Image (tube, coloured by chain):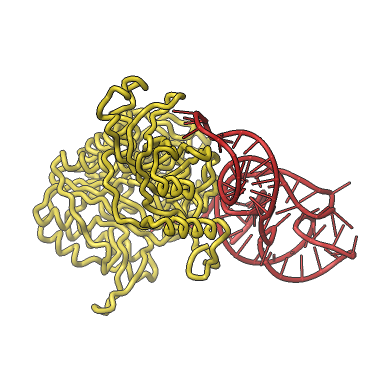
RNA sequence: GGGCCGUUAGCUCAGUUGGCAGAGCGCUCGCCUUUUAAGCGAGAUGUCGCAGGUUCGAUGCCUGCACGGCCUACCA
């Protein structure tokens, strides 16, 4: 398919032959530039409102334009031809006539293939069928496509090829292009929102001596000169909070995290997170901020507060629903005829029994009641949370970086936001007591066997000992939010180059 | 890891109860100076994913493998 050993196919041989013929015309075949005066869209914007007669009477149209684009259709009549150029979002028709073009340039147009790039200069007019068209006075060859474009009107449908050769997907499928345009608008809206709220955009290490800030298996690498092992970060969290200690009270980062775990429709090994921290705020304050952020993203990314997602219609309108993790789980169990009262909620044995009764896989031991409760919630409730919903009250046991809730022993001031059955965001009042943080890390480590990559982050504890103000923090899964706002069922559909198994024999 | 489905021309796909491998687009050649998936005429597409097996004969049936998709499980 590629690489030095690949043999040119029949199409490529033909196209190389034509390239030689173009070269033989004395035309530069890989020129360095083309000074276009208009993009194709700009031609349409400037002249699209004018009818045939008005165009003739418009000096600007008669004086002409210089445009450039990829040839995506050729309808040839021997002594004349219509070409269609495509570039960015626009397309424009070109009319080529033997009696107008210089001989060499007309011959050049006969040697064009679909996919080639050309520049065209000439006046703008309308054809008999009222199509806005540039009549070619000059044709400049710009670049050769040695390989054919995807098939014309089915587009490219093979999923594997769409992901591996995304440029073909973008070329052949307008809806793919729309997904990534919307994603870009959404990310830009996130940035603008954070900037407007007075947050400073920062970048923190991707290569970290300890993979901290989330419970996930990291990728490992090695720095030769330093002679140390490093990890690709699983989260920026602890670095961002160091910055709050350092006197940046509002910081955010939009960047990649890496988790060495399975792939699924909701998981890519590298994914984009927006994380932000705000001094003097807390869980409740961050929920309010997150709400406004998500609404802004929906407005910009999806063009409104109401978003179609598969079978559902998501309404990103404030205030979002709110429910505690315990209430949601108790209600889901009640719906299955299982009563769960206060005592059972704190009993690992009872919660494990419920797993068995419902035929659910138990979390890997050791699992206390907090982890078992979360496991029930994830199994029973997550997928049902279609409308944007804040779930609050996560057990301390599964929230090592969150502040405890003074009103609710055993639980933290923490929320997760769900929509479309997906976890979109996770936020909490940041634990800033260095001694308690050290104790929590210790508990986490005690529960793990092996895994030296999860060693205690003493450097972070030291930062806390210098004083972290009360702070709220949130992480937003940018890819998943993009899934919701583009009605994409798989995370691969919103990542330009998703990870796939390497192809054999290439 | 498990289940189901798929792999045929450059692309999208059909097909054969086992008997010369097909269509549309694209491509090549010819005609055509206002077309819109242009039209007309002619032509070429190929390791039917790979390896074995059954058979007079396998793209088709059997076994194994590879690759991919969907679902599912795992990933505190």
Q: Nearer the viewer, residue A44 or A268?
A: A44
Q: Number of marks in the image?
A: 0
The picture places residue A306, in percent across and down from the top left corner, at 37, 28
Would residue A377 appear left or right of A248 to someone viewing this image? right
Residue A484 lies, with reference to residue A125, above or below; the image says below
Can residue A330 be seen?
no
Horizontal and vertical percent position of residue A152: 53, 42
Quarter residue A342 falls in: top left
Q: Is residue B45 left or right of residue A111?
A: right
In this view, the residue in front, A327 or A454, is A454
- Residue A503 in percent (x, y) is at 52, 63
Viewer can see residue A372: yes
Query: According to the rendering, which colour does chain B have?
Result: red
Give above or below for A477 relative to A4: above
| x and y, in percent, of residue A322 in the image | 32, 33
Among the 4 quarters of the image, the one containing residue A210: bottom left
Quarter holding residue A390: top left
Q: Residue at x 32, y 59 (%)?
A: A234
On screen, residue B3 above or below A286 = below
Q: Which chain is yellow?
A: A
Q: Residue at x 27, y 24 (%)?
A: A58
């Amino acid at each position: 398919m590629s690489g030095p050993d690949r043999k040119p196919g029949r199409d490529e041989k033909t196209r190389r032959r034509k390239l030689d013929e173009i070269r033989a015309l004395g035309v530069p075949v890989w020129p360095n530039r083309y000074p276009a005066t208009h993009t194709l869209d700009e031609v349409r914007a400037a002249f699209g409102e004018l009818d045939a007669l008005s165009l003739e009477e418009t000096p600007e149209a008669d004086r002409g334009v210089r445009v450039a684009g990829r040839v995506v259709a050729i309808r040839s009549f021997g002594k004349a031809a219509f070409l269609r150029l495509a570039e960015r979002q626009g397309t424009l028709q070109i009319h080529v006539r033997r009696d107008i073009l210089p001989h060499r340039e007309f011959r050049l147009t006969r040697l064009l293939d679909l996919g080639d790039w050309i520049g065209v200069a000439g006046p703008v007019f309308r054809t008999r069928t009222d199509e806005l068209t540039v009549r070619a006075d000059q044709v400049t060859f710009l670049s050769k496509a040695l390989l054919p474009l995807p098939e014309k009107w089915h587009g490219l449908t093979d999923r594997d090829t769409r992901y591996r050769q995304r440029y073909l997907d973008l070329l052949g499928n307008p809806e793919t292009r729309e997904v990534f345009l919307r994603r870009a608008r959404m990310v830009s809206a996130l940035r603008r929102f954070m900037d407007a709220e007075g947050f400073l955009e920062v970048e923190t290490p991707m290569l970290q001596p300890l993979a901290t800030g989330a419970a996930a298996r990291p990728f490992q690498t090695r720095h030769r000169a330093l002679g140390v092992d490093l990890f690709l970060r699983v989260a920026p969290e602890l670095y961002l909070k160091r910055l709050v200690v350092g006197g940046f009270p509002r910081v955010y980062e939009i960047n990649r995290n890496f988790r060495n775990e399975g792939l699924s429709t909701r998981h890519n090994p590298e994914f984009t997170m927006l994380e932000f921290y705000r001094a003097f705020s807390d869980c409740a304050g961050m929920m309010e901020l997150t709400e406004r952020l998500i609404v802004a993203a929906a407005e910009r990314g999806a063009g409104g507060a109401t978003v179609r997602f598969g079978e559902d219609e998501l309404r990103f309108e404030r205030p979002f629903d709110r429910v505690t993790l315990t209430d949601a789980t108790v209600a889901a169990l009640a719906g299955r005829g299982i009563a769960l009262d206060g005592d059972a909620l704190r009993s690992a044995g009872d919660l494990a029994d419920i797993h068995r009764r419902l035929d659910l896989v138990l979390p890997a031991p050791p699992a206390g009641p907090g982890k078992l409760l979360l496991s029930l919630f994830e199994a029973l409730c997550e997928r049902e949370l279609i409308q944007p919903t804040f779930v609050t009250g996560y057990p301390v046991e599964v929230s090592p970086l969150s502040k405890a809730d003074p009103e609710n022993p055993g639980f933290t001031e923490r929320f997760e936001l769900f929509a479309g059955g997906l976890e979109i965001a996770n936020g909490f009042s940041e634990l800033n007591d260095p001694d308690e943080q050290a104790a929590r890390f210790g508990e986490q480590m005690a529960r793990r066997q092996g895994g030296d990559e999860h060693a205690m982050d003493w450097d972070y504890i030291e930062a806390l000992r210098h004083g972290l103000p009360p702070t709220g923090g949130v992480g937003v899964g940018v890819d998943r939010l993009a899934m919701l706002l583009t009605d994409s069922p798989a995370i691969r559909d919103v990542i330009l180059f998703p990870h796939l198994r390497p192809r054999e024999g290439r």
